[in-house]
């Protein structure tokens, strides 16, 4: 193994360029970590925010972009057990994914199911762990309930729809085109709303007068009160992102109080090591076998080579995706 590696450098604030292949020292894993030789990594909106200068990495983490990878274990720390060199793994990281090598906490590793390609495995961790955390741990959604998933054709949206289908949770969703809604329907959504053509509130209330138990929202903006309108009693609205802007519409307190609603926000990147370890363990036990059975699939849109990383970023920036955009070394 070389003492140096290639990585993708970014110029903060430059969204039209500034991505280049550079060299730096290969990370040295701590005793609780493994060193993974990266075969592929995925592009997330958090990468774009960090590139723009709006989402710095947590203190002490790598400033290199990238929150999820797939690869092969190159070496293991002295305190690591249960993992061996040569094993194929995928994982979330707090930074450093856009590189040939990355040091990862062993407790955050997911063993890649044999039937998944490297590109599919590279796009598994962030979207499925984010969706699982939001639905089960934050939203406390239970089997047999109902949910509204906004941005259903995004990576997290398609993962959430599939998890809901796995758990017998009926879903409504919003997306910007008929093609995206078709992808949502295939993932399990039963109520499909093109938000550019119709308001989701009457569409959902017409079929489900009692409302939904949870709304998963990555849009924000003027969706807040409309989310509350379709919410069932004691339901929750969980926010993951703010694609429509950081400020929501004027909160209707009477509507929120009348439904005993909870409005929650959550992130995954800045959670501590133990939280992520528990999340990975719970997800792996409950959901990983469903990939082997074909009940869950990584929503893969496009695979680029490293030299086309700028094109990959621009595709995500333009919202022209149905699932994950992945880059292979």
Image (cartoon, rainbow, N blue to C red):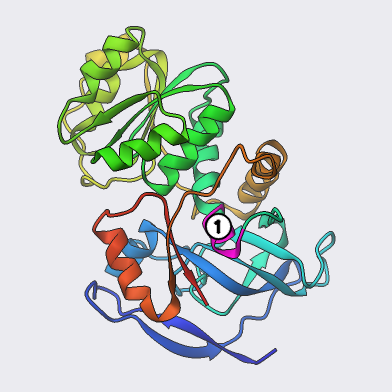
Tag 1, which secondary structure? helix
Q: Which residues are magenta?
A: 117-124
What x and y, as percent, mark residue 120? 55, 57
What x and y, as percent, mark residue 160? 47, 37
Residue at position x 32%, y 36% from top? Answer: 181
Asked if 30 appears above or below 24 in the picture, the reply is: above
* In the displayed structure image, the side of residue 295 where residue 311 appears, left or right: left
Residue 281 lies in quadrant: top right
The residue where tag 1 is placed is 120
- The stretch drawn in magenta includes residue 123: yes
For residue 253, say whether it is visible. Answer: no
Asked if 159 appears above or below 307 in the picture, the reply is: above
- The stretch drawn in magenta includes residue 241: no
What x and y, as percent, mark residue 140? 53, 25
Asked if 235 appears above or below 264 in the picture, the reply is: above
Residue 49 versus residue 321: which sits nearer the camera? 321
Residue at position x 64%, y 92% from top? Answer: 3
* In the displayed structure image, the side of residue 229 where residue 172 appears, left or right: right
């Amino acid at each position: 193994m070389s003492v140096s590696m290639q990585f993708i450098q970014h110029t903060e604030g430059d969204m039209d360029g500034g991505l280049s292949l550079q060299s730096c020292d290969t990370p040295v894993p701590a005793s609780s970590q493994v060193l993974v030789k990266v075969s592929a990594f995925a592009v997330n909106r958090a990468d774009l925010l960090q590139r723009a200068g709006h989402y710095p990495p947590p203190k002490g983490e790598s400033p290199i972009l990238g929150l999820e990878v797939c690869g092969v274990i190159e070496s293991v720390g002295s305190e690591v057990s249960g993992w061996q060199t040569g094993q194929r793994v995928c994982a979330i990281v707090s930074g450093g994914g856009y590189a040939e090598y990355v040091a990862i906490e062993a407790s955050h590793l997911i063993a890649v199911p044999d039937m998944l390609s490297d590109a599919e495995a590279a796009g598994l961790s962030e979207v499925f762990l984010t969706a699982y955390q939001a639905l089960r741990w934050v939203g406390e959604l239970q089997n047999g309930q109902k949910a509204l998933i906004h941005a259903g054709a995004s990576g997290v949206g398609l993962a959430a729809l599939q998890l809901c289908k796995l758990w017998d949770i009926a879903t409504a969703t919003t997306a910007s085109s008929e093609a995206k809604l078709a992808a949502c329907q295939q993932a399990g959504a039963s109520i499909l709303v093109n938000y550019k053509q119709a308001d989701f509130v009457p569409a959902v209330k017409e079929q489900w007068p009692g409302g939904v138990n949870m709304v998963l929202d990555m849009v924000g903006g003027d969706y807040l009160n409309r989310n509350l309108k379709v919410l069932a009693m004691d339901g929750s609205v969980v926010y993951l992102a703010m694609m429509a802007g950081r400020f929501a519409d004027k909160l209707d307190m009477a509507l929120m109080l009348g439904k005993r609603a909870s409005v929650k926000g959550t992130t995954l990147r800045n959670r501590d090591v133990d939280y992520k370890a528990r999340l990975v363990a719970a997800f792996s036990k409950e959901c990983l076998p469903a990939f082997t059975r074909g009940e869950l699939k990584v929503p893969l849109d496009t695979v680029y080579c490293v030299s086309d990383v700028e094109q990959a970023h621009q595709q995500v920036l333009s919202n022209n995706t149905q699932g994950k955009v992945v880059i292979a070394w």
